[in-house]
Image (cartoon, coloured by chain):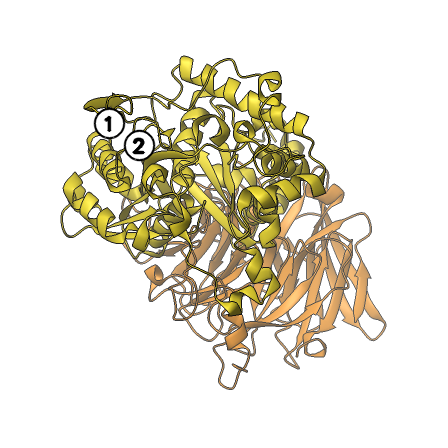
Amino acid sequence: MANQAPNKAQERLSQVADHMSGGGSASKKGKSSLLEKHADDVVVTCALRTPFTKGGKGGFKDTQASDLLHGAFKALLERSKIDPNLVQDIAVGAVLAPGGGATEFRAAALAAGFPVTTATKSLNRQCSSGLQACVDIANAIKSGMIEIGIGAGAESMSTQYGPNAVSEFSELLESHKESANCKVPMGVLSEQMAKAKGIPRSEQDAFAASSFQKAIAAQKAGLFDEELAPLTVKWTDPKTDEEKTITVAKDDGVRDGITPESLAKIRPAFAKDGSIHAGNASQISDGAAAVLLMKRSTAQRLGQPILGKFVQASIVGVPPLLMGVGPAAAIPPVLEKTGLNKDDVDIWEINEAFASQCLYCIKELGIDEKKVNPKGGAIAFGHPLGVTGARQVSTLLTELRRMKKQIGVTSMCIGTGMGMAAVWVAE
Amino acid sequence: MLEFRTQGYNGYSVKYSPFFDSRIAVAASANFGLVGNGRLYILGLTANGIVAEKWFDTQDSLFDSTWSEAHENQILTAGGDGSVKLFDITLNQFPVQSWQEHAREVFSVHWNLVSKDNFISSSWDGTIKVWSPNASASIMTLPTHSCTYSAAFSPHNPSILSSVSSDSHLRVFDLRTPASASNHLTMNVPIHTPSKPRMGAAAPVGVAPSEALTHDWNKYRDSIIATAGVDRLIRTFDIRMPNHGPIAVLPGHEYAVRKVSWSPHLSDILLSASYDMTARVWTDGSAMGVDNMKQENMLDDPMFHGGGREMGKMGRHTEFVTGVDWCLFGAEGWCASTGWDERVLVWDCRAIMQ
């Protein structure tokens, strides 16, 4: 027929193929469906963090976690221009703060300019607290409990790191093997795991050195500028005991000139014949981060810029002594749930608690090391425990956008034996 | 189970005659309907099995057929070349009438079940056309702006018709409304709207639109329509509350659903045909006494809704099942199915229902 398309057979074939490939809406998955934009997507419209500074000697050594959080909130309100009255809930991940920091964080939110109607909670899922905070807020938005919320993290390891973080184990807990394992120090168990899983020191040092090199390159190129919110704080000079007011604008743990050879000279920290040392483990740091989340429809109504969306998260438990395998256990379920292939993921932000466990997870998952932590990780700029999960969101989304890529995964291992992972899409 | 082979032709639709309990029409196409001829089979159910009483060949693929409700020997076909043809099965070879207005493949034809004096066709060209067998041109064109796989008259009202299309919408047109910018469109229901959240079940979120391939009006409850398509789910809607989401959602098919058909005998039973090579029988859970025991387990899946369930599965086809239809006469479970395996099966679905 004259009015028929010339490649009719081809078009009919692709039509039938579309019928076959379209998944059930209940089970609709995979990269293409992930990239679709729907009004009820939970999106990120602002994600930022304070610089991370070295515990005990860095720029924030004399600043409380709540003050860091206050700084992050102020910057978030300023940058996003969101009306604070519209923010209904704030979740703050924090690990070391006594009482979870619940009182100080609520106070910090009020001081930052949020009205009394904005609720605040703190939560603690160890090293994934920041991610858990974002996921909690995203789920509350998804379910309709709130419309706009902030997932955040705040940690002052300088002021709060120490033996007080865990109360003494009762006889009951001590008498149960797995339960007693929960208090084995992470360095010690990571040392054992590195041995058991056969990750030699040379590989760990090479991985750690590349983290430093990537981070210093990114810092010099200004790749962190977009996510960083400089903060002015009081700081006591340890030499003169003089209190000064300083503005911290960049991560001070990132060092230039680190090579596998220079790391090879450092003495192991946890065992004489060990492989883990200060140079290939995450740094003790202070910092805060905040992520503003809402539905796409809300963002469009308010004219908020959409940086990316939250898709799905997973949480799994692993044996406490194998804490470090967390990402290797948590990532497959989240890929399965979203129907993603590991090759679909453009950037992996896997927390570098220890080079050994991060390397193990990369190998176990069989993912391309080039796609992991392209701007360096916690080994280079620090791991303020409750902040990392929220920090990864800003680090990931800015980098995805810069590289014009889309799909990212953030993940970390969790003390006492867990892993968490989340899938994000940059727009 | 009776069987007939449509050798060299892949089945696309099967329809029982509304006049004779032993007559079935099958619309079939060579080369899976991608390119080549179409063939309309008129089959007779006899003591010696199924026999082909007659067939008509067409230049292009056939995707659907519908028996005339007014004339026992007349039947319409939906053609890949955009034509709608009327055949008289007492004649040989050629159609008695052919209408050529659609710009793309016609995917469905349906005769008005109440007034019996007009019929509709729906097409890939994004339109539904209303025709009279006595007029040489269409009476009316209703745009859907989307590949329309299925259009049907209400079995209860001669002026109400509906369609589903690749834009994931169920449209209802009322021809009594004044012609205006809306082109008689009175309802446009997004099929992918999640069902209302219930206690104890997570709210279904982010259901993406997907192509709707088939729908059917319930023969007893005049506001109930079942739809199905690429997302593998069968849904029922009550057009009295179009914004309420589906009142039942029936998951189970593993690939797209190509055809659904309500039972002419039982108000809660429907039959489906799918690319997963099965035909399945379902209850939508509306009938009295339908087993609600499983309800608790079903709540696990937030998409599952309404207390309906799959009652049985017929897995004898070896390729995509594209058509199913119920026999209007006799015992209440007889039905016919056809598919790309070049076969027509006539079977009693009571044998597989549990």
Specify whether disc 2 shares its chain with disc 1.
Answer: yes
For marks 2 and 1, give the CA distance.
8 Å
Viewport quadrant of the C terminus of chain B: bottom right
B218 over A281 or under it: above or below: below
Q: Is residue A107 left or right of residue A189?
A: left
Front in this rendered view, residue A223 or A360: A360
The percent coordinates of residue A215 (x first, y second) are: 47, 21
Task: Specify the label residue B128 is tagged with.
Answer: none
> Which quarter of the figure has residue B293?
bottom right
Q: In terms of secondary structure, where does tag 1 sit?
A: strand
Viewer-nearest residue: B343 or B354: B354
> Which of these two is toward me, B282 or A384?
A384
Give the colour in which the image draws chain A.
Answer: yellow
Say which colour chain B has: orange
Amino acid type assigned to the residue bearing label 2 in the image: Lys
Check disc 2 and report the residue beneath it.
A61
Give neighbour class at mark 1: few <14, some 14-19, many 20+ (Cα, 10 Å): some
Task: State yes or no: discs 2 and 1 in contact (Cβ < 8 Å).
Answer: yes
* Pointer 1 residue: A236
Query: Hey, what amino acid is under mark 1?
Result: Thr
Residue at x 26% of width, y 23% of height: A237
